[in-house]
Image (cartoon, coloured by chain):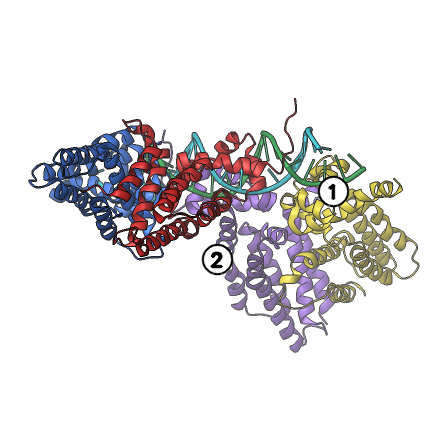
Chain colours: A blue, B red, C yellow, D purple, E cyan, F green
Amino acid sequence: MQKWQRRKDQRPMEILTAALGLFVRNGFASTKIADIAKQAKVSKGTVYLYFESKEALFKQMVHQIMVPKINEVEEYISSYQGSQVELLKLVIRRWWQTIKESGLTGVPKLIISEADKFPELTQYYMKEVIHRIQSILISILKKGKQLNEFSNIEPVLCARVIMASLVYFSMWEVSLKKYDHKNMYVEDLIEQQISILLSGITK
Amino acid sequence: MQKWQRRKDQRPMEILTAALGLFVRNGFASTKIADIAKQAKVSKGTVYLYFESKEALFKQMVHQIMVPKINEVEEYISSYQGSQVELLKLVIRRWWQTIKESGLTGVPKLIISEADKFPELTQYYMKEVIHRIQSILISILKKGKQLNEFSNIEPVLCARVIMASLVYFSMWEVSLKKYDHKNMYVEDLIEQQISILLSGITK
Amino acid sequence: MQKWQRRKDQRPMEILTAALGLFVRNGFASTKIADIAKQAKVSKGTVYLYFESKEALFKQMVHQIMVPKINEVEEYISSYQGSQVELLKLVIRRWWQTIKESGLTGVPKLIISEADKFPELTQYYMKEVIHRIQSILISILKKGKQLNEFSNIEPVLCARVIMASLVYFSMWEVSLKKYDHKNMYVEDLIEQQISILLSGITK
Amino acid sequence: MQKWQRRKDQRPMEILTAALGLFVRNGFASTKIADIAKQAKVSKGTVYLYFESKEALFKQMVHQIMVPKINEVEEYISSYQGSQVELLKLVIRRWWQTIKESGLTGVPKLIISEADKFPELTQYYMKEVIHRIQSILISILKKGKQLNEFSNIEPVLCARVIMASLVYFSMWEVSLKKYDHKNMYVEDLIEQQISILLSGITK
DNA sequence: TATGAATGAGATTTCATTCAT
DNA sequence: AATGAATGAAATCTCATTCAT
């Protein structure tokens, strides 16, 4: 009884975790409920015990797996004291660190791949993840400009340029890395990005 | 009022063009042959007259639509005379211009989404598109370093950072743009990217 | 003009001959009009110029290819003068010889395979081929019995037993021979059959 | 009023049995999965639950339905004590009896019709059925010759002549019988065959 | 609660037949 | 008369979902 109860509590997340990996690798349409069940070591029927449909499972997966992580960076950042230059470095490194530790590296690829199939989800993701990180970056850039730490850049555009490569790196990690002829690491790419960003490449 | 017309020469490309749009929007698995046929204004049977299977159609689409465009940037660049700084700007702007004019904006999204389903295609794309553009960037960066135009950056990593945002922008254009709360243009983002890249943001 | 006219006359039989080979090998349903057209070195459209449908083509094939051969054995036999024992041998050998020379070895297999798909055709074949040969055999056997050449056999049953192996041999030739571990010839089997039969039924 | 029942163990054989009847009547290509499903009183999907494809179903049908019957005649025969003449009669009668009781009358027609579509299956059938029965016949004929029961026949050829009519009779039963103008029985034909054979080969 | 056998709607694919050229 | 591109009805096969066990 006790054991079953515990299972009942854990099962949904086990299924969602299994689903995430498969959805990232194969996309929504190509991922079969049978595969998810197998990966989660339950039967197909059990998946339907916890989730109404494949679409509902997908949506809940994105929500439940992302929600608890969204505030993390924000909280970490807001408590920080120091120069905007250091803060900018911190945010960039922290994004990758968090996304990787949480096993969410594949989420951006998934959102971009399935955007038009799940518009509300995409809007949610844009609003709650992308735009919030961008806001953080914009506020750092604006403050840095005021404090004369940064040159005359356009914070809104600049924040998007920074996000662009960060999001791309996570997609590259799950999708193209294995087909790349060079053995590279996202960490190195991010450091290079920080370096270019902060110091510029022209003399 | 004819039931149909004989247009053996035009059909295949019309089908491929219809397919590209749908594959980019919906992905491989969610795109139905019936949709492609409808979009190309032919019957389902006609699609199979020119392509062996849905997979074969997908592969030919990527090949036939990409191959004629690959050399374009390369040729344009190789004929250029001027400073490496100007050349770098040129390459970046030209990439976007070419990809947009050719209607290939959606290809990167497609490749990343379907990478594991079509490994040979992904390798082909990496080798013939991504790595070739990267090589061009690397050679510009190396030459610029030698000529003292650029500071002490690492050309290989730097080229990838540049590619990262460029590739991301094209994915954003076809996938996330419509869900973005701000009305932005890739052209502006690219100019900002060039600006940051060339001048740096720290004083 | 003249040449075309000649073609117009020959085409139907060329198509029927091509069809016979393919129908025998692959059966009715698995034989494609495209295959027949290819084999006959015409286009699909041309097949429909001469035959209303695939079924009509099949029926005409059986009729036109068989009709001119049916009377041959009968005529040959009826003109023969000699003992019934010799006549019996003659009929048996002649059946195989005729069927082989006419390229009709595959017809029995075809009729048996497609009997229920083409009942009228099967009835026609039974009536015009099988039963007529059987009648010849029966009349020989009866006469032989009267003339005391043969022992006390039942002509009707005996004729069918003879036919059984003859028909089987032609099916074996086109269907199983190539999968047989021993390299055998129908001619030898027929001689053995004749030998058993005659020592079995002659006094 | 239940929508369906769980009958994992019985389903496969029910489907195979349904398939055998339809394949024998209509051939491989003309038999639709929908027909088999209907006959077996399951849905199309259920057929694919137990069999990978139509071809796989066909192959398994031939194997599973034939294998358990193959040894039956052999065992029955090997335990027999008596003269070779009696044994020969026994084998011939037993073949028909077994094939009929097992509902396998249609298998020879099927094999001959589809031989070239399923070469491995045909080889299997030749090796495991036809050649084994032939071996039994050959050994009886040889032994009978040694024991001076039989005249100077060629056992190998003779065995094939015997098989020829036996196999033909089973094809006739399922295919041509209903189009025959005389109402005959295989049993009578077999007795006639035995009668001719034995007076033909016994001394 | 958990299972996985059974279903059936809908996808891909085939191919006899038509008809513009 | 001849062609073969185009069609669409019908086949095979897939898989999300249901429900008897």
- Determine which residue is flagged by label 1: D181
Q: Amino acid at mark 2?
A: Pro
In the picture as drawn, the residue positioned furthest to the top comes out as: B1
Instruction: State which quarter of the image contains the N terminus of chain C.
Output: top right
Q: Measuring from the top left, give residue E3's x and y in whole percent.
A: 28, 44
Q: Measuring from the top left, give residue B107's x and y in whole percent.
A: 41, 41
Q: From the viewer's perspective, is C115 left or right of A183?
A: right
Q: Are marks 1 and 2 in contact (CB under 8 Å)?
A: no
Q: Which of the marked residues, 1 or 2, is nearer the chain's N terminus?
A: 2
- Determine which residue is flagged by label 2: D68
Q: Is residue D150 above or below residue C9?
A: below
| Callout 2 crowding tier (Cα within 10 Å): few <14, some 14–19, many ≥20 | few
Query: Can marks 1 and 2 be said to lie on one chain?
Result: yes
Name the residue: 72% across, 46% down.
C19
SS assignment at label 2: helix
User: Chain letter of disc 1?
Assistant: D
| Quarter assignment of residue A52 | top left
D135 and B30: which is toward the camera? B30
Q: Amino acid at mark 1?
A: His
| Quarter assignment of residue D89 | bottom right
The answer to whether residue A153 of the structure is visible from this angle is: yes
SS assignment at label 1: loop
User: Chain letter of disc 2?
Assistant: D
